[in-house]
Image (cartoon, coloured by chain):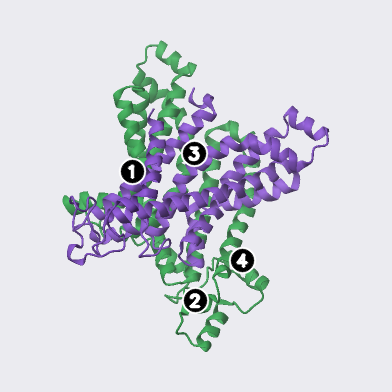
Amino acid sequence: MIKRLGIVIVGVTVAAAIVGPWIVPYDPAAQQLSLRLAGPSWQHPFGLDELGRDVLARLLVGARISLLVGISVVSISAVVGSVVGVIAGYAGGWVDALLGRLMDILLAFPGILLAIALVAVLGPSLSHVVLALVTIGWVSYARLVRGQALKVRELDYVQAARALGAPVVRILKLHVIPATLSATIVQATLGMAGAIIAEASLSFLGLGVQPPTPSWGTMLDAGRSHLIDAPHLTLFPGLAIALLVLGFNFAGDALRDTFDPRHTL
Amino acid sequence: MRRFLLRRLLLTIPVLVGVATLVFSLIHLVPGDPAQAMLGESASGAEISDLRARLGLNEPLLTQYGRYLRGLAHGDLGRSFRYNTPVEREIAQRLSNTAILAAAAMAVALVVALPLGILGALFRGRAIDQAAMTVSLAGISMPNFWLGPLLAIVFAVKLGWLPVSGTGSWLNLVLPAATLGAALAAILARMTRASLIDELRELYVLAAKARGLSEFRAVMAHALRNSLIPVVTIVGLQFGSVLTGTIITETIFAWPGVGRLLIQAISFRDYPLVQGCILFIAVTYVVMNLLVDLLYGWLDPRIRYE
């Protein structure tokens, strides 16, 4: 039951990100300097920031950034990782060994460190954040799909298809990839949580989305200077990140239970 | 054991070379001229060519790579552009601070996680178990860049019990260590609980209870030790998160460690220092994973014969 809550949290956030900016009557960039750092009120439920901008309006635009980064990172990583994983698992031999070593080296880096390194040299921007997170993200999908592909290629119906002369691409498309799909979907849902945290971390460190574009990470970073006089600047963006991450983690667990009922037993 | 040790050590070598190669290639990924990027738009042509020569960027790529690897073999990580000192010296000066923070965070995690996990296992399914697991779930979901400022608001700003940043006394360590250790504590608590519940179903525990031992004594005297094997692995595997977590935690609390040095180096575009810090953190991570594997082989003899 609690895991379904994850799907609700994700659904509400997506809906808020899509329609929210039209419902909230404030421009996220509009400044009311006379009201700077004002706390929550009826007019501004989440208060105003250091430049007098409405925090709720900025959070809603920030949700778009978080979801956009999450979806981009996860979808590109899943496609790249699945292709590499299927090739490694199905081909075996030196191809598998070579791709395996490459994955080992990338996994030898703590994930976010490589992302920090890449953004540090490429320069801070949203597209570089996505590129950096894909660079570390595809490996987990490749490992997962490789393992599944190794298993599937030994199954009788796949052996039969091969014996009947079906081309490799057809076997991969019709038999191997569909068999790995459910595990990939679960991984992708959990990966959304990881990507959202990673984007917020990079933005918090000043390496992600650059001001004035509102991102939850940059909003938290700005809030650090006002812990005493405006704690709401820290409270709400952090709460938004934690809730959405929790939502995706629960949703991933719920999907895993659906695809693999044995997991819950 | 010796064969296992040798095999594991040999497997680490290509990974270390790969890591070094990746770090070496970083400076070549800088868009445009790295020397220009470091010096800024106002730099003269002479300054740029001087810096290119100092960084060895004019030499062929393979020569640069060979020199880089030779330097690493001698512990030479290059020269910081900002401080004009050897990179390894800058890292060494801050190393103890990062080590203290990481060790304190792991200690906090263990001190919190073991009792929570044991309570969860002993009272599984009951309110106390659910409360312990809810606390740990909150710990997992809270990113440290949020938890840190929140703890600072409560314990430094509102209550005034602890300093908000800096170094000087052990009180300065409390908030950074709690921030860094919270997520690990949450993971370890869940792991300890799950592993202990599995262990409590084993025959030797049932036999101990049949001999009249209380559940508590059966756990403390028998099951806990065996259930710690996966927990040790998780501690080791999570070391990477703790290590990278220091980057954010040190930045939040102005803790003068290697993580903060890295972020400062990035903001000053001090690429040799960035490379040095990244390499240092990555190599520490690889070596820690190696040590965990060896420790695991020692704890569980089945591993080394596989």
Tell me which residue sits at (54%, 32%) in the image. Answer: B300
Q: Which chain is purple in the picture? A: A
Q: Colour of chain B?
A: green
Picture quarter with the C terminus of chain B: top right
Establish whether labels 4 and 1 are both on one chain. yes
Look at the numbered discs 2 and 4 and tell me whether their residues touch, using CB distance below 8 Å: no
**Residue picked out by circle 1:** B108
Say which amino acid is labelled 4.
Leu
| Mark 1 / mark 2, whichever is N-terminal | 2
Q: In the structure shown, which secondary structural element does the residue marked by tag 3 occupy?
A: helix
| Mark 4 / mark 1, whichever is N-terminal | 4
Query: Can residue B200 be seen?
Result: yes
**Residue picked out by circle 2:** B37
Q: Is residue B109 above or below residue B53?
A: above
Q: Nearer the viewer, residue B191 or A189?
A: A189
Where residue B141 appears, x then y in whole percent?
37, 42
Tell me which residue sits at (36%, 55%) in the image. Answer: A61
| Mark 1 / mark 3, whichever is N-terminal | 1
Say which amino acid is labelled 2.
Ala
Q: Nearer the viewer, mark 1 or mark 2?
A: 2
Quadrant hosting residue B113: top left
Q: CA distance from mark 2 to mark 4?
A: 24 Å
Query: Can residue B172 be seen?
Result: no
Say which amino acid is labelled 1.
Val
**Residue picked out by circle 3:** B233
Assess disc 2: are there few (<14), some (14-19) or many (≥20) residues with their C-alpha within 10 Å of its C-alpha. Answer: some
**Residue picked out by circle 4:** B69
| Mark 3 / mark 2, whichever is N-terminal | 2
Q: In the structure shown, which secondary structural element does the residue marked by tag 4 occupy?
A: helix
| Mark 2 / mark 4, whichever is N-terminal | 2
